[in-house]
Image (spheres, rainbow, N blue to C red):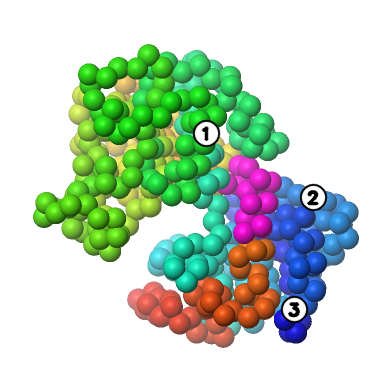
Amino acid sequence: MNKKFKAAVLKETKTPPDRRVVLAPEQAKELTEKFPNVELFIQSSNIRAFKDEEYTALGLNVVEDVSHCDILLGVKEVHIPELIPEKTYFFFSHTAKKQEYNRPLLQALLKNKITMIDHEYLTDKNGMRLVAFGRWAGLVGAYNSLIAFGIKNNSYRLKRANECHDIQEMFSELKKIKLPPIKILITGGGRVAHGAEEVMQEADIEKISPEDFLDEEKTFDYPVYAQLDPQYYVKRKDGEAFDLHHFFKNPKMYESTFKPFTKAAEVYVACHFWDEKSPVFFTKEDMKETDFRMRVIADVSCDIDGPVPSTIRPSEIADPFYGYDIITDKECGAFDKDKNAVTVMAVDNLPGEVPRNASVDFGSALLYKVFPSLFGEDTDGIIERATITENGKLGKHFQYLKDFAEGK
C-alpha cells in the first residue's frame, strides 16, 4: 500500500438531481484513517443530503475543483461536459447493457481516455455483487405502493419518503395506514424484494405462501402479501423441472405462469430482475380481462416496454405516480377513479428518496469490500472485472461493447 492517491467525492451532476453521495461523512473520515496513502477531497455540493459542513466538521477537505485528483468517486452518471480526461471514475454508468441513451457517455469515456469503473460490476470471485442500492429501492418502492393505495381509495395519507428525515421516520408513518383485507404481491428474491418485504413487515401485513395467495377457498379478513421467486412465475416450455441457474442462462426456454396472480392481487410491487429474453409477466390483453384485479403497480424494476405493460415511462421522485388506462393503452390521471385506470409508480432512482440512509449503507460496502482492492492490491480482480473503459479502450470484460461504442 505504498502508492499514493488523491481521491475525490464528486458532487452529483445528473438531471434530475440526486441527493445521494458515494461516501457519507463518517465513511469519508474512516477512509482517510483506513488508507493513509489516500488524500481525500470532498467536492462542494448544495444538493447533497449531507451538507458541506458535516464533512468539514470531521476535518475533511471540501473544495470546488477536483481536477488535481486521480480517482473521482460518484453515484450517478457524470454530465459529459464535466468529465475530466485521463482520470479514473467510479459511478453507475448504465452503458454496459448497451443502453442507447448513454451511448454518447460511453463514447466520451473512450475519447477522453478515462478509466471507468462501474459500481454495478463490482463483484467477488463468485460473481456476487459487492455494492448496491437494491434494498433501498425495494423499501421505497413498496412504501410508495402503500401511499398510492391510500390516495386512490381515499383512506389515508402518508408523508413521502423524501419528506422523512430517515428510514425510521418513514417506518413510523406506516403506523398510520388502515388497509382492508387486500392481497399484495412482490416478485423477486434478491435485495430489492427483501427491502419491499421489510416495509410489509413494518406495516404489520402478514406474509402468506404463493399457493394460499391463489387459493380461492382461503379467505383473509386482514391484508396479506406473498413474495414470488421465479419458479412461481415461469416454467420450462419442455416440461422439465424448474432450475434457477438454467433459467438465468436460458430464459428463452421459459414461459410465463404469472397470469393467475393478476386475478388475485390488488397491489403489485415488481422487484425482480428481468432479462429481455425472458417471457413477459403479463400482456396488455391480459389487463383487459374483466377479472384483472391489479389497481396499483409499483414497478421498482422499471423496465420500460418490458414485462409489465403498464410501465410506459419512468417517473421521477418529484412526481412518482401516473395512471395507465387499460383500454386505451394511454397515460391517464394518476388516481383516476375509472375502473380501467391503474396507478403506476415507476421511479427509476428510488434510493434517492432516502439519500442519507442509502449513502451510509453504500459507503460502508465500498469501504470494506472494494477500496482495499482499489487503494491496495487487486488480488481478486474486483477492480478489473468492473473496468468498462481504460486508456481509450474497452476493458477486458467489456469487449462486446465495441460495435455499440462505434455507433453500429
User: Which one is earlier in the sequence, the residue at label 2 or at label 1?
Assistant: 2
Q: Quadrant of the N terminus?
A: bottom right
**Residue type, mark 1 in image:** Val
Q: Nearer the viewer, residue 23 or 189?
A: 189
Measuring 30% from the left and 47% from the top, which residue is drawn there? Answer: 230
Q: For residue 391, which quarter of the picture?
A: bottom right
Q: What is the CA distance from the residue labelled 1 to the residue labelled 3?
A: 41 Å
Q: Are marks 2 and 1 in contact (CB under 8 Å)?
A: no
* Label annotation for residue 355: none
Q: Residue 80, relative to residue 148: is it above or below?
A: below
Residue 229 is situated, as x and y percent measured from the top left of the image, at 33, 45
Residue 122 can be seen, yes or no: yes
Q: Is residue 179 magenta?
A: no
Asked which secondary structure carries label 3, the reply is strand
Q: Quadrant of the C terminus?
A: bottom left
Residue 313 can be seen, yes or no: no
